[in-house]
Amino acid sequence: MLKKEERKKFNGVISGDHVSLTTNKSLVDEEWFHGVLPREEVVRLLTTDGDFLVRETTRNDECQTVLSVCWSGHKHFIVQTTAEGHYRFEGPAFPTIRDLILYQFNSGLPVTQRSGAVLYKPIPRERWELNNDDVQLLDTIGRGNFGDVYRAQLKNSNEVVAVKTCRLTLPEEHKKKFLQEGRILKQYDHPNIVKLIGICVQKQPIMIVMELVPGGSLLNFLRKKGSGLAEGQLMKMCMDVAAGMRYLESKNCIHRDLAARNCLVGYNNTVKISDFGMSREEEEYTVSDGMKQIPIKWTAPESLHFGKYTSLSDVWSYGILCWEIFSRGATPYSDLSNSKARLKIDEGYRMPAPENTPDEMYRLMLRCWEYKPENRPNFEQIYTVVETLCAAYRFC
Ligand code: ADP
């Protein structure tokens, strides 16, 4: 922890850390103002005692400004408004929230006596945190679980991007889940994983900005254009997904919702894995909050029975995804209900190969559908198999 005398005093600019607290700025222009960034994301940014930032939150339809500080854990102080319309915590009141925060920072006094929390270091926005106004929405290209997906343009670079929006009316809980995808994606860089450009949390609606993958969802693509695709091209799609999944496996990321509907098709029919809304960064993840909205026909038996997810349960879904690719967008177990399909799988039933599926590819699907996860190949092994098959079709 920094000693008080070591703190860089505010007199226009805080030296070091590239964080300016200059005069004549409004609160929203300050680098340490994080808009409506949810609390979960905020605590991730505040790691050392004295780290602080300011954000907004909505409680009972009322917008509140919150000072979040790392101080023996995390403390969140709601800015109080006086009868005169000034702002304060326990000490003096100021005409602007910005003045209040600067006072707390300069004085080195605790925000409240009880907490003892002192402001040492303003934490600036991450490079991912874009301004909502930097993005111009153009037209709707899809509908997600949380809100519409748009084609959009970044005003600074003119880059055309895809933007997922989160409906204002969704409960706070869902808004947090919405940003989960951004949190996961920002760490990854792979040609077969959709790229994150940024998140917009300066104000509502919160948005996730991603690279635009022009062919849209793989499922629609297969249904519309699948009849024109040769086996070698289908194999190449399976290889693209295997490459992306091998990368995720190496990062201990479990996708949990791998399916053709959650992949996108880019230039040269390159497949990119998308929709990381359910993904987790853990070697093993056990669901404890019930099994709502589980994609039963894509989910491995151990996940359905025990809520246990690993990369090897993603392997099961990968087998189903390959089946979707080779059937050119058919629905798995189309003559069975979810619960019937589940029962039959437990009894040993497996889907037959779609027409014209190469034998080796179907053998791989069956290995992915081994009942016990430890008997399935991992993505490293799968990639090697599919790459070899692809080479035979001269599609690598
Ligand atoms: P959610 O995660 O909320 O379910 P999806 O990721 O499934 O949303 O997106 C819904 C649809 O929006 C997709 O099926 C696809 O058509 C379109 N879409 C999503 N992301 C992109 C993108 N990066 N590029 C192009 N289209 C996209």
Image (cartoon, helix red, strand yellow):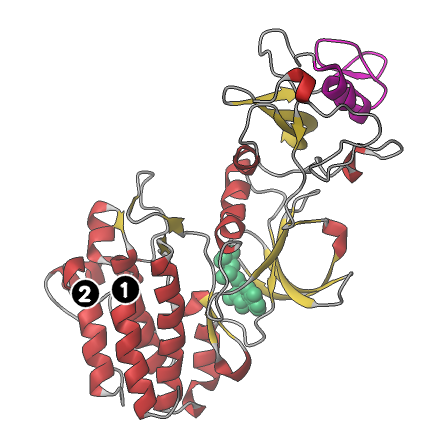
Give left or right: position of 179 versus 25. Answer: left
Q: Residue at x 72, y 25 (%)?
A: 8
Using the image, determine if residue 21 lies above or below residue 286: above
Q: Position of residue 237 (x, y in %)?
A: 40, 79
Q: Nearer the viewer, residue 146 or 258?
A: 258
Q: Which residue is mark 2?
A: 376
Question: The residue under label 2 is which amino acid type?
Answer: Arg
Contact? badges 1 and 2 (CB < 8 Å): yes
Q: Nearer the viewer, residue 44 or 14?
A: 14
Question: The residue under label 1 is which amino acid type?
Answer: Val
What's drawn in magenta, residue-wise?
80-108
Which callout, 1 or 2, points at the residue further toward the start of the chain?
A: 1
Q: Is residue 85 magenta?
A: yes
Q: Which residue is mark 1?
A: 315
Q: Residue at x 34, y 38 (%)?
A: 289
Give left or right: position of 60 versus 373. Answer: right
Specify the quadrant of the image occupied by residue 98.
Answer: top right
Disc 2 under 8 Å from ligand 1? The reply is no
Q: Position of residue 142 (x, y in %)?
A: 57, 65
Crowd tier of the residue under label 1, counting other residues whose Cα lies within 10 Å: few below 14, some 14–19, many 20 or above: many
Using the rendered image of the protein, determine whether residue 90 is visible from the camera's viewpoint: yes
Q: Residue at x 34, y 75 (%)?
A: 324
